[in-house]
Amino acid sequence: MAQSRAGNEEAPCSPEAHPSKESSYIFKVVLLGSSSVGKSSLAYRYVKKDFRDSLPTVGCSFFNQCVTLDATTVKLEIWDTAGQEKYHSVCHLYYRGANAALLVYDITSKETFEKAKVWLSELEQEFLQNEIIIILVGNKHDLSEVREVTTEEAREFANTKSILYMETSAKSDYQVTELFTTLACELLKLEQQKKAFHATHWKKSRIDLQERTSRPRKCCH
């Protein structure tokens, strides 16, 4: 992974979530979901620390933010994809090579929740489960009194798919920073799991090779 300089500091992860030595990572994060669910507002709130009602994204917009987690610097490259149906067919070009995906829906719109399920199905075809971190995000928590999707329903769905679930509000800044900090922590955990797996696999391969080369050779007659 390429290195990046530290930016805004966020809450630290648990010690298991990151290496003990100073290091840095860059992760690609894609925001997926229907138009007007607040994807751009979430990214803007997190990066600019402000709220802005945005016009529908055309194609894709880009943000980046650094998170410092103890001795580890994580740079999140946030790709905000267009939610309009006419852009759906090209969105796979943007999430190709992603390390994480935030599936955003509007808690006041059942239709956007169903659309998030469609995005998840597409990601499941593109990535193996241990290749990408996915968080289902119910946005517009400030409108909870008119919600169409209950917290229980969304959490149950997320549990059946073994993905994380959080509710946010870009407008009231409810759990926005927590969302991206959680994402950074989960990405570091996954990275460490991959490193541990490769280290174990390499050690086993080396032992097998040493055993083969140390066996006595039979002479030919």
Image: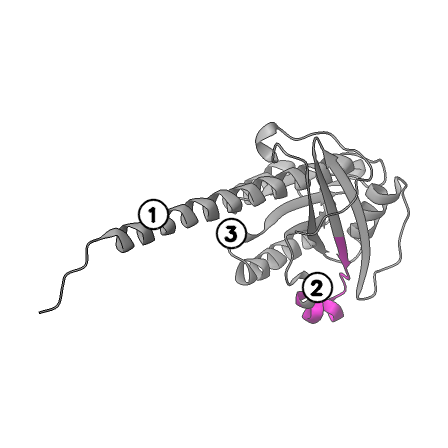
Kind of element beneath mark 2: helix
The residue lying toward the viewer, choosing from 63 and 165, is: 63
Q: How far apart in space, not on screen, are marks 3 and 2 (Cα)?
A: 19 Å
Give the residue drawn at x 46%, y 45%. Answer: 199
The quadrant in which the C terminus is found is bottom left
Q: Which mark identifies residue 207?
A: 1
Residues under numbered marks 1 and 2 in contact, where contact means CB atoms less than 8 Å apart: no
Q: CA distance from mark 1 to mark 2?
A: 41 Å
Which region shows up in magenta? 78-92
Q: Residues within 10 Å of mark 1 (few under 14, many from 20)?
A: few
The answer to whether residue 148 is left or right of residue 155 is right
**Nearest to N terminus: mark 1 or mark 3:** 3
**Where is mark 3, residue-wise?**
129
At label 3, the amino acid type is Gln
Q: Amino acid at mark 2?
A: Tyr
Sequence order check, earlier mark of 1 and 2 = 2
User: Which mark is first along the chain, 2 or 3?
Assistant: 2
Circle 1: element type? helix
